Image: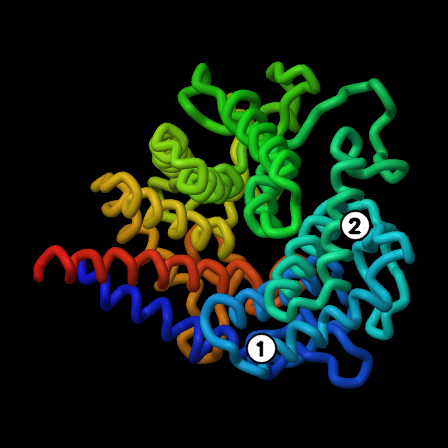
Amino acid sequence: MDFKKFSEQYQTELLDNVLPFWLENSLDREYGGYYSCLDRTGKVFDTDKFIWLQAREVYMFASMYNKVEKKKDWLEAAEHGAAFLLQYGHDGDYNWYFALDRQGGPLVEPYNIFSYTFATIAFGQLHLATGNSRYADVAKETFARIRAKLDNPKGKWNKAVPGSRSLKNFALPMILCNLALEIEHLLPAELLDGLINNCLHEVLDVFYRPELGGIVLENVTLDGQLSDTFEGRLVNPGHAIEAMWFIMDLGQRLKREDLIQQATQITLNMLEYGWDKQFGGIFYFMDRSGHPPQQLEWDQKLWWVHIETLISLIKGYQLTGSQECLIWFEKVHDYTWKHFKDTDYPEWFGYLNRQGEVLLPLKGGKWKGCFHVPRGLYQCWKVLENIACKDVVQVV
């Protein structure tokens, strides 16, 4: 495998295609913030603004400024979105709404914890870029809200009858594994260590189930038991695989080879479990008992699932030398670039049917924004570049 060639492919796609698409099309110069709902060509088709996507775009441009190049346009784009979030995105006490109208009027209450998590990493990254203490304060205050909501993330907006069927969800400990490293510079060491240890316990000791063949579940009971219900049987292969590269990063930070090895093996388990052996690609939702999932979109192929899988596979190969990871990387790479990349217009498609045909030609919407594609391209570019450089050193 020509790692240098692959690295350049991801780099070029990021810098010449995807980031320019969002920079040119998403900034609302009149009312602030970003347009998320962009059609195939980049034209706005809806002006509602979703906080988690606004925050993700702030994070993305600030991150690129910090990690790739000190480009003025990227920092200005990040601060453009941050100004809108600070003015309109929360209730005054850093409870972050889910959706706003174009002018910043709140549409959906702050029920969604992921508005909070992405606001935290957005302002944490922007603080790194600027040194502005206001951004650090927002990140820390928001993180405090997250910690207070861990036992009941939706708070008063939880529609479940109290005590009827209490389940906890994988998504929050999963994202906190990543958030911990994103705001490491803002947290006391003791708090950070406690957060990391708790996240690792939840992901690897609670939601990962060796007795089910080494898969990761989306929901378990509050005491960590299996639940024979729609929610309790739910498997989201992409979620589990994405979490594994977060674990690999934590393994590197903690110098724990066992974490890296386990995360690599779980990646392979979930990919084998979730791969559509008839049409290729990774299923969106599955039922651990083989029953029909309640999600009607269960067999769709989604952009983020495949991009996050590429990250975990190439990191798994880099860190362990697993040839199985490398073989799967090339297979998933071929599927992803063939089906999700739009060869006629910038950015990537997000939604395919089971056969791999485009379902929705949008480039951004309520759930897809400036995040998974650019972050994934960056991660793969840098890991592949690192592998290529080591290969050159070894040859010399």
For image coordinates 75% across by 41% down, the residue present is 146
| Residue at the disc numbered 1 | 74
The quarter in which the N terminus is drawn is: bottom left
Secondary structure state at the residue bearing disc 2? helix
Q: Crowding at label 2, few (<14), some or many (≥20) Cα neighbours within 10 Å?
A: some
Vertical arrangement, residue 258 with respect to residue 174, above or below: above
Say whether marks 1 and 2 touch (CB < 8 Å): no
Nearest to the observer: residue 239 or residue 71? 71
Q: Earlier in the sequence, mark 1 or mark 2?
A: 1
Secondary structure state at the residue bearing disc 1? helix
Residue 371 x %, y %: 56, 61
For image coordinates 86% across by 55% down, the residue present is 108
Q: Crowding at label 1, few (<14), some or many (≥20) Cα neighbours within 10 Å?
A: many
Q: Is residue 126 visible?
A: yes
Of circles 1 and 2, which is in front? 2
Residue 36 x %, y %: 68, 69
Residue 252 falls in image quadrant = top left
Residue 258 x %, y %: 36, 28
Q: Colour scheme used in the picture?
A: rainbow
Q: Would residue 4 appear left or right of 30 to someone viewing this image?
A: left
Q: Would residue 226 appear left or right of 18 to someone viewing this image?
A: right
For image coordinates 50% across by 72% down, the residue present is 347
The quarter in which the C terminus is drawn is: bottom left
Nearest to the observer: residue 300 or residue 129? 129
Vertical arrangement, residue 226 with respect to residue 70, above or below: above
Residue 163 falls in image quadrant = top right
Residue 126 x %, y %: 65, 65
| Residue at the disc numbered 2 | 141
User: Of the residues shown, which amino acid type is indicated by label 2?
Assistant: Glu
Residue 370 falls in image quadrant = bottom right
